[in-house]
Image (spheres, rainbow, N blue to C red):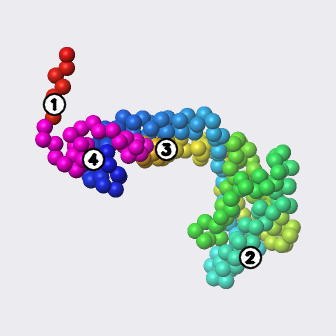
Amino acid sequence: MGDLDELDLRDILHIIGKRFWLIIAVAALAAFLTSIVSAFFLDKIYSSSTTLIVSGQKSRTNANDLQQSDVSLARDLVNTYSVIIKSDSVLEKVEDKVNLDIPLKDLRSNISVKSENDTEIIRIIVEDTDPQRAMDTANSLADVFMDEVTSLLKLDNVQTIDVARVPLDPVRPKVARNTALAAVIGLILGLGIAFLAETLDHTIKTQEDVEKVMGIPVLGNIPNFGK
C-alpha cells in the first residue's frame, strides 16, 4: 500500500477492515489490563468532609442585624482560615489526636480546604486509604482549627454545620472511567499500529496494488484454480 498521505477514504476503510481484529485486540487488551490494575493493584482512596461557617462577629442577638460589611469580613476570613487549617501547628495537634504517624507534608497533601461557592462556608476534605481515619481526621481537624482560632485570633466566629461521616465508597480509583479511557486510548493505538503496519508493508497482493505501484492498468490476471 502506498504512503499514508495518498490514502483516500476507501483506502482508510480498507485498512481498518483488513486489520479490524488487531485494532479491537489492542483496545480490549488495554481496557482489560487497566481494569485489573485499577480494581486490584491501586489503593482505594476514601474522602470525608466537614463544613464550617464563618461569621463576621462573635455573636449576634438578632439575625436582622447582619450587615453587608460583616459578610465581606467573613468571606475575607475564609482565606485566612484556610491557611491556618493546613498550618503545622494545627496538623501536629491533629496527628496527636488521631494517632497518625505520617510526615506533615503527606498529611497536608491529603487535605483540601475550599470555600463553597465564594460564601462564608468552608469545606474541609480529607482523603485516606482508611475510611474511618478519613472521618476522624476531618472532624479532628475542624475541632483543632476552631480552638486555634479562639486561641490565636481571640475570635469565636466559626461553627460546625456538618460533621464528617465514614465514607462508604472510595472516590478513587474510578474503575469504569479508567477502563473506558484505556479502551479509547487502546483503540487509537490500535489504529496507529494498523496504519503503520500497512505503510511498512510493500508487498503486492491485489490488482489494485499493482495499478497503484506501477501506475498502469492491469489488462488481465491468471486465476488460481487450485489443485
Amino acid type, callout 3: Ala
Q: Give the class, few, some or many, for how many residues have Cα within 10 Å of label 2's Cα (few <14, many ≥20).
A: some
**Label 4 sits on residue:** 213
Sequence-first tag of 2 and 1: 2
As measured in the structure, the alpha-carbon distance from the residue carrying label 2 to the one carrying label 3 is 52 Å
Amino acid type, callout 4: Val
Amino acid type, callout 1: Ile
Amino acid type, callout 2: Gln
Sequence-first tag of 1 and 3: 3
Element at label 3: helix
**Label 2 sits on residue:** 57
As measured in the structure, the alpha-carbon distance from the residue carrying label 2 to the one carrying label 4 is 84 Å
Q: Residue 154 lies in what quarter of the image?
A: bottom right
Q: Position of residue 195 (x, y in %)?
A: 38, 46
**Residue 20 highlighted magenta (yes or no):** no
Q: For the residues carrying marks 2 and 1, which lies nearer the camera in this image?
A: 1
**Label 1 sits on residue:** 222
Q: Give the class, few, some or many, for how many residues have Cα within 10 Å of label 4's Cα (few <14, many ≥20).
A: few
